[in-house]
Amino acid sequence: MKLTLIASIAKSLLLARWKQTLVAAVGVTFSITMFITLLGFMNGLNDLLDGLVLNRTPHIRLYNELKPSTRQAIDLADDYKGYYNFVRSVKPKNDKLQIANSGAIMKALHADKRVQGIAPKILAQVFYNVGATDLTGIINGVDVLAENKLFFFSDYVSDGNYIDLQNIPNSIILGKGLGKKMLANIGDVVQVTTAKGERLQLKVVGFFQSGLDEVDKMQSYCSIATTQKLLGEPNSYITDIQVKLTDILLAPAVALEYQKLFGTEAMDIQTANSQFETGSSIRTLISYAVGITLLIVAGFGIYNILNMMIYEKMDSIAILKATGFSGQDVNRIFTTIALTIGIFGGAFGLLFGLGLSAIIDQVPFNTAALPTIKTYPVNYDPQYYIIGGLFSLLTTYLAGYLPSRKASKIDPVDIIRGK
């Protein structure tokens, strides 16, 4: 009964100054709306920018790297043992970039439960022959189906069908920028020369566009079989094994494990793309900071309105306390007012934030660099709405609690005597 009476008094005070109440609720609504919209848009943009690189990067890359031997011939000579031997102009070992025993390694990776999938790859430095001019570039020899499954290869093929790379022998998908340089169209035949002088004519079956202009001007894709034929290498020739894990956070530790186990170099995604993760975290931090600042500003608005309401309702508070209401009851009345503003303002803010995010999601965003992106990116992660709702309640509660403590300490005798 007492709680019902407290709620009724709180309602009366709210309606008695409905304009100020409306202003406070609108402030909360606007803050929550912008908080949701800002976080959704900023994180959608983060996902887009990170996806340009991170979705195309394996969690772990196994490869061989040319490097000088740690032990030189002079270290093996008995006559020079016990000496400090200084050898200048040390040359790399006479090793191939091929991963030895790649079949057994891939079989072991498939058996590892931490591995989501693997995609073998061959990196080949080539010259694209354009008349009397040679353009330097790189051919990525890929397992087409595995590449598409793990790294969304088809999303970056802007013209043509990615599966033609597997079905049509001696075919190639050129980078969009490279295709423009060569004035090539789908169906044309281009000639490619390797660093060893091997030449092969390849049929253009499509163009890909990664969104990174320098990459699109140099790189192209062939099937593994075509690349092996181009290089004059056997079917076992593989230079890279791309690994995608079930949990990306395991990549650094698993990379070290694989490096020792297989005797190859292993690069994890965190090391390879640390600058992208840093940029993403900073952008997210900025969006949270701006959103929370908006909510705090709205909280100060509510605080000022309730403070003025208490000042104008001193006589009413004195009467309440004189008729038997305790300081705690008065505290509950004004806290209820603040939470009511927070609940309704926050609820409308969440709805308007979702609506505004949906509108942004439909705004056309056409750019030649990102052919697969048609509208502005928005992230609808439920945690943003949960954070926004909880923070609106917390902010309004604190904004109401502080003035309500002041109201609960009012001495009715002093107020009545002053009147």
Image: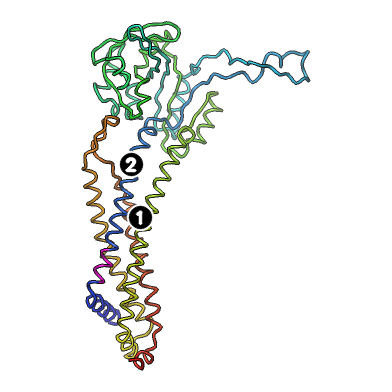
Q: Pick the residue in front: 347 or 115.
A: 347
Q: Pick the residue in front: 116 or 17.
A: 17
- Please tell me which of labels 1 and 2 falls first in the chain: 2
Q: What is the crowding at mark 2: few (fewer than 14 residues within 10 Å), some, or many (at least 20)?
A: some
The image quarter in which residue 345 lies: bottom left
Magenta stretch? 20-26
Q: Pick the residue in front: 352 or 2.
A: 352
Horizontal relation, residue 96 to residue 395: left or right:
right
Horizontal relation, residue 253 to residue 89: left or right:
left
The image quarter in which residue 138 lies: top left
Where is residue 40 shown, x and y percent of the image? 31, 48
Where is residue 263 shown, x and y percent of the image? 55, 23
The image quarter in which residue 308 lies: bottom left
Quadrant for the N terminus in the image? bottom left
Whether pointer 1 and pointer 2 mark residues with C-beta atoms closer than 8 Å, the reply is: no
Residue at figure coordinates x 30%, y 77% from the top left = 309
Q: Secondary structure at mark 1?
A: helix
Where is residue 88 shown, x and y percent of the image? 66, 16
Residue at figure coordinates x 39%, y 17% from the top left = 137
User: Where is mark 2, residue-wise?
Assistant: 45
User: Secondary structure of the magenta portion, mostly?
Assistant: helix
- Look at the picture and state if 212 lies above or below 167: below
Q: Could you tell me the amino acid type at mark 2? A: Leu
Q: Secondary structure at mark 2?
A: helix
- Look at the picture and state if 187 lies above or below 419: above
What mark, if any, has residue 94 been given in the picture?
Answer: none
User: Where is mark 1, residue-wise?
Assistant: 291
Horizontal relation, residue 277 to residue 364: left or right:
right
- Look at the picture and state if 357 lies above or below 391: above
